[in-house]
């Protein structure tokens, strides 16, 4: 049998299988489920200063520790819970990030008093097509660490009391949950994402509140 040829992927994901799987099935696919969105924004906060591979390897532990990222459940965690989480070797034991996750759950509940969903809120920060790069080659993508929309999202969330939501973290969140499609030209996933966006455009994006 001949050697199986791997499909072309983005430059950052070829080192490990866990990265390849995440890239092929999750990164950049549009997300509209609030629990999934809250998980993503929390994990991006935990990733700050660390590698994303570290977070991926610990993701199931994070889900166990934070009750599946159920917003209401996390919002009711106490100081005793914080101390318990600080002793959990399965997650990133950073007190500020743990406290921020609980704080952000409470902020999410507050936001949901005026918004129909987190998805409706986050998708309002989708960039206009004309503001995106003209080319999605490796050199261009390596420079994409923030955008005016990520800055605006960060600023608005901070005003609402959220923590660990700086512009770079928010741009990574936007990449992860599909507000932008930053797969490079030629990547086998890029066209799949364009198709996914076309399929949902009339069912959600054009009708978001």
Image (cartoon, rainbow, N blue to C red):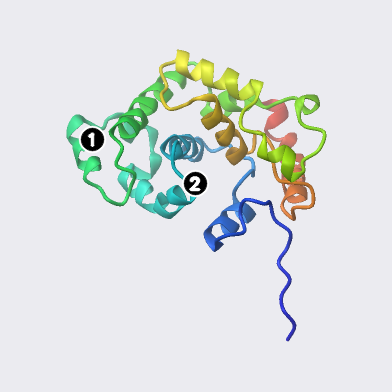
- Residue furthest to the bottom in view is 1
Do we see residue 126 in this rendering? yes
- Element type at marker 1? helix
Task: Find residue 52 and name its label.
Answer: 2
Locate residue 46 relative to residue 187 in the image: left or right: left
Name the spot of residue 65 as percent of width and height, x first. Answer: 31, 45
Quadrant in the picture for the N terminus: bottom right
Name the spot of residue 170 as percent of width and height, x first. Answer: 54, 29
Question: Which residue sits at x=20%, y=41%?
Answer: 84
Name the spot of residue 134 as percent of width and height, x first. Answer: 82, 33
- Which residue is more in the foreground, 11 or 132? 11
Residue highlighted by disc 1: 82
- Which residue is more in the foreground, 171 or 202? 171
Question: Which residue sits at x=62%, y=59%?
Answer: 14
Do we see residue 209 in this rendering? no
Question: Which residue sits at x=35%, y=51%?
Answer: 61
In front: label 2 or label 1:
2
Report crowding for label 2: few under 14, some 14 to 19, many 20 or more residues within 10 A (C-alpha): some
Quadrant in the picture for the C terminus: top right
């Amino acid at each position: 049998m001949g050697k199986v040829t791997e499909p072309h992927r983005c430059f950052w994901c070829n080192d490990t299988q866990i990265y390849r799987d995440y890239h092929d099935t999750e990164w950049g696919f549009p997300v509209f489920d609030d629990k999934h969105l809250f998980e993503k924004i929390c994990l991006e906060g935990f990733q700050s200063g660390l590698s994303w591979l570290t977070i991926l390897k610990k993701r199931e532990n994070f889900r166990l520790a934070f009750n599946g990222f159920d917003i209401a459940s996390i919002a009711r965690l106490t100081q005793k819970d914080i101390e318990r989480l600080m002793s959990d070797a399965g997650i990133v034991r950073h007190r500020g990030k743990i406290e921020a996750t609980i704080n952000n759950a409470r902020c999410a509940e507050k936001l949901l008093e005026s918004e129909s969903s987190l998805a409706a809120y986050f998708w309002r920060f989708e960039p206009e097509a004309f503001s995106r790069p003209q080319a999605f080659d490796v050199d261009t993508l390596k420079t994409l660490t923030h955008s005016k929309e990520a800055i605006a999202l960060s600023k608005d969330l901070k005003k609402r009391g959220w923590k660990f939501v700086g512009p770079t973290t928010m741009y990574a969140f936007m990449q992860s949950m599909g507000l932008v499609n930053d797969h490079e030209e030629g990547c086998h996933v890029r066209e799949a994402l364009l198709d996914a966006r076309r399929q949902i455009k009339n069912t959600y994006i054009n009708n978001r509140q």
